[in-house]
Every structure is written in structure tokens, then in C-alpha cells.
Image: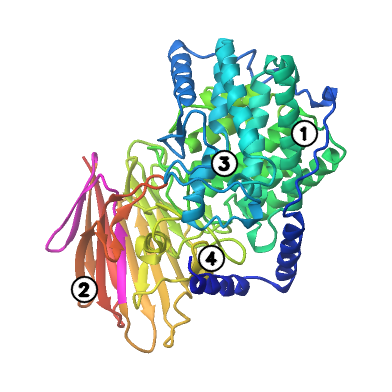
Amino acid sequence: MNATVRMVWWVNRLRCMSVAEIGYRMRQVARTKMARGAALRAVAPPAKLPASAVLPRARSFNVHGAPALGPLEVDALLAEADRICAGHVVLFADRSFDVGVPTVWNRDPYSGVTGPSVFAGDIAIDKPEQVGDIKHVWELNRHLHLVRLGQAWSVSGDVRWLHALEQQLRSWLDQCPPLSGPNWTSPMELGIRLINWALLWQLVGGEGSSLFAGESGQRLRADWLDSIHAHCRTIARNLSRHSSANNHLIGELAGLFVGASVWPCWKASGAWMEQARRELEQQARLQYSLDGVNREQAFGYHVFSAEFLFVAGLVGQSCDVAFSRTYWSILQSALRFLRSVRDVGGHVPNVGDNDDGSVFRLDAAGGDRTAQLLALGETVFGTQPATNAGVRWLLHALPGKRPDADPHEADTGWAFPDGGYLLFGSHFGEENEIKGMLDCGPLGYLGIAAHGHADALSMTLSVAGEQVLVDPGTYSYWQDRKWRDYFRGTSAHNTVRVDGRDQSVSGGRFMWLRKARASIERMPASPHEFDFRGSHDGYARLSDPVRHLRSVRFDAASATLVVRDEVAAKKSHPLEQFWHFAPELNVRLTSTGLHVRGKRFALQMQASGRDLKLELVRGAENPPLGWYSRCYQAKVPSDVLRISTVSSAVPVECRFTITFF
């Protein structure tokens, strides 16, 4: 980022701040300057942890001893542990990287750039020449893969896994001393690392583990606890506040709560634990809507934040520091929303940002995190035994009594107006399911709306468990700016763009300056007789203000969807309507519209209006159009129908008719 670009970014960032936040940021800068060059003073832990620090082991949730695994599961786990020891680690969803033997913890495994071992406050994480892609550095150093080594020890009892763990932890502690290097630049990353260290601590036997046998083991224990103290203290002093108080704050508080609960070794531990518990209760209420939708308007972060809240809650249950019934009810509502938007094929729309980051990973790489989270809820809130492998492991490591929760929470719903989503369709949960979703909510959360996309009044659709109309996803945070702008921009969503501009105005990769506001003008009565009308003000900023109105009607009896777009303005404006299709579908233009064929269905679309130009685009790069991203740092070409016209009093109407075969 050159000097001019950086200056523009700072000006834009200041525009998103309140006076109170500016004062807070100035105090944080002063504190950082004071900390430069002064290492955290180590506070020696007790020779033996207090009895309250020893968490119970596997006493409930129908789990007794180590989780029951089949031979194939054990073989797969040990094979992955072998690959980890050989330096091959899976990051994000399912991408394997060579991280070296021994691991070079400050090196970005994607670019090969090694970050400097200097004071963390002096490191610019947005400079690839200095740190590479910081997301890859952070993902490696969350230590999800070290927990797999703890699992390998737990199922086999083979001492070589403890030796491997000792080497990995020793090298990390030596290479990453407190406040030094890129792995101390994000308090949330410290929180995630504490959570995985806590899981690892439990899996290897805690305080009595043979990992701490002998002189070298005791030195490892002492140095590890010193680092844990530094993690807790650093988080407590650098909590994300004001416009940054999104999933980062939840992650920081969850990590602080877990660290202070599992290792209550220091004078400040009790205060840290109570502060984190109190603020987690508050943030759960603030960051999830009344109907269970995460207010970042990003479904990946809906799951991510819920994982944090679940882990903190389960640690609280294990330590007899229970969270409130309201806290658990919020998690129940969050799961209800996920269960509702998930189609019969297991797909969840790619709404908003998603970087595939996980709080924990206790099952095979590439597992379905949404399915795991829902399975966790079924076990914790219901009577279902833990059948999901990751859930069995989590409840083995963090056993405790069931939380106080509402046993009558509904399984699913279709209307989430406070969160901003409405579902339409028929035969939900059945073989011939038609499930559509309409986005009529806000852009994102707080002043910068960091992870929201310019997708007001956008839609998705799946038929018979196949994705049809899709949200193309995220792709990458740190690739060329054109890709970041495209995937979060209006042309990458199933909605309308006016004058070639996004509905909302970007101020940076994680910042929106002007935010489109959507309004529901006619609320539908049901998902199968769906009649919606809404609008947004994103183009009211134009010199000739434009109002976009969208009507959506779905009739279950005829399996017909009708979408009508109108624009209201004094003058004519170029208008584009976009329809993005899943990459696997067969899509072709016809003389009257579009024909789409899936495995078990056909969809016919007819467009009507004045002087419409229909164009099918796939994999265009300058400017980008026609791409789909299933997971972070990956994209594939996909078909996009762009309907162009010049706005007039005549609306653009698209009629979709679905037939099964």
C-alpha cells in the first residue's frame, strides 16, 4: 500500500469512527508505543495448578473414556498426524501446505515470505513484502493441527506423538516470544490459539500429562504457561472496541475466558474470567438478531462466532461457571437460522465474507462445519448422542453438565425479518425441495460493516438439493484489489446495478463508507405463497437519485418464481440485472430467455421489458464477471446472465418455471 493509498485509507477509516472511538484509538497507540521494546514481565505459575484448574474428563453426554472410533477413523487420524509431523498441514478448508520440519512459524506457507521477529506493533500486516499473506500465517499458528497430534496420542497411547508435540510447542515458544513477530499482531488470533491449546492440554492429560515429565518437560510446562499468561494479558489490554467490535471481540473474549478458566494461575485470572464471561453474554445479545441471524450479514462468520460462543459455554459448564439461559437461547436461535437456510443437499448460501477459518478442528480436514455445529447443538440441547466425530471429540475434551436451555425451541422457520432474510419455496427438507432466500437486511455490522457485501435485495435458489442461483462467495481478502472489489460488489450478486456502480460505497478492503438500506414494504404471508415487495436507498446518493424496488412472487402449486425490478428516478439510467448460476449446471441462452438443467430438474426463464440485452458471461477477467468461490483462495468460472437496458417506466420482469424429471 503506497503512501497516497494509505492516506486515503486512513481518511476513510476516520470517517467511520465516532469521537469516542478516535480517543480510544489514540490511547491504544500511546499504549503500544510504551510497550515497544519492553517485554512482558513473566509471572511465574505455581509449581502445581490449583485443583479448580483440573477440568473433569468425559463424565457426561454419553461419552465414556476416549471417543469410540472405528478402525478406519483411527487409521485416518494417525495418517494425518504422520503428515503433520512430516510438515504437511491442512489450512483453511482443505488445502495442504508444506510448513517445514521443524516448522518455520513466522513464514507464510503460501508465498514463502518470513515475517520479521520484531515488536508486533511495528509490523504492517497489509504489506505482503513484509509478512506475505497474513491470513495464511495466522491460520497455521492457530494450532488446529497440533490438536490432531493430541488426538493421535489419545487414541494410541504412542509416546512418539507426545515427542512430536513437545518439539512443535518448543519450536513455537522459541520462535514466537511474547509481543514479537506476526503471530502477536492480532488479539483474536491469540484467543483462537488459547482455545486450541486448552483442547490440546485436555487431550494429553492436563497437569498430570507425561508431556511434562523430566527436566525438559518441566521447562516446557513453565515456558508454555508463561506464554499463556502473555496471551491472556495481551488480549485483555487490546480488546477490539467500537467499530471493530465484531467477531474479533467475540473471539478475543472467548479465548480470554478459556485461558483464564483452564489455567487460573495468576492474580488477574479471576478478573479476566469474569470480565470475559460478562462481555460474552453482552456480545452474544448484540451480535445476533432477535431471530438468530449474525449481524455481520456473513454466514461464514455466523458459524465462526457461534463456534466461539459454544466453546466458551462448554468450558464454563466444565468449570461450573455457567452462562445464562439467555446466552444458550441465542445459540439455539443461531442454529435454528442455519438449519432453516440450509438446503436438503446440505448447502448454505455464501452470503457475505467467508475465509474458511475455524475455531477448532477435531474431525477430518474439509469437514462440513455447519453440519458439525448443528450436530453439536442436537447433542448439547437435545437428547441425541454425539454421532459426529468432531462433536464426540469436543465433548470428550470439554465434558460438563447440560446447559440450562429452552427445550421447546422450534427446529426451523422461514421469516427472519430482524436479521434480514426471508425464505420461499416448497417441500422443505424433502427430495423435491425448492428453497429460495431473499436478502432484505442491512449491509453489515457497526460503522465499517467489514464483512458485508453490496447485495441488497439479492436472492439465492436451490432445487432438489442442487444450488441454482448462487452467491459467488469471497475468494480472497488479499489478492489484487479488483478481485476483492468484485466478489463483494453488486455485480457478483443476484440483484440490480445502476450506472455501473455498487449499491454501497467501499472505503477499503474491510470498510464501507455509504451503506444501502433495504426496506420491506410488503411482507409475504408464507414461503409457498410468497408475495414480497421491498426497496433500498443505495442509489439515492446519485446526482439524480434512484430508488430500486423489487417484487418477488413464488407460487408452490405451479413451481413458478416471478421477479420484477423497477427503478424510480427523474432521468434514465443504465440498468443491469445479474443472475449467477452454480458452476455445475448446464446453462444456455434461448430465443426467449434462458434454459438451465440440473441432475433432477429443469428451469426455464423468460425475461420481459423494453430493449433488453441478454448476455451470458463466464470467467471474464477485465472487469471480472462470472466466477464462483467455494473456499478461500479458490475460484472457478461460472455462468452469469446479465440483462442490460436503460431504465424507463417499464420494469424488467423475469419468470422462472421449475420442472422435475
Which of the two marks, 4 or 2, is nearer to us in this view? 4
Identity of the residue drawn at 64% across and 13% down:
64
Q: Are marks 3 and 4 in contact (CB under 8 Å)?
A: no
Identity of the residue drawn at 29% across and 68% down:
653
Tell me the number on the disc at residue 612.
2
Q: Are marks 2 and 1 in contact (CB under 8 Å)?
A: no
Amino acid under disc 4:
Met
Percent across and percent down for residue 156 are 55, 11
Q: How many circles with numbers are drawn on the protein?
A: 4
Badge 3: residue crowd in 10 Å (few <14, some 14–19, many ≥20): many
* Magenta-colored stretch includes residue 314: no
Identity of the residue drawn at 73% across and 14% down:
214
Look at mark 1 in the image and give the residue it sits on: 261
Badge 2: residue crowd in 10 Å (few <14, some 14–19, many ≥20): some
Q: Earlier in the sequence, mark 2 or mark 1?
A: 1
Percent across and percent down for residue 323 are 76, 39
Q: Which segment did they paint magenta? A: 575-600
Q: Earlier in the sequence, mark 1 or mark 3?
A: 1
* Magenta-colored stretch includes residue 579: yes
Q: Residue furthest right?
A: 267
Q: Residue furthest left?
A: 591
Q: Are marks 1 and 3 in contact (CB under 8 Å)?
A: no
Q: Is residue 446 left or right of residue 510?
A: right
Look at mark 3 in the image and give the residue it sits on: 335
Q: Which quadrant, please, contains the C terminus?
A: top left
Percent across and percent down for residue 581 are 29, 53
Q: Are marks 4 and 1 in contact (CB under 8 Å)?
A: no
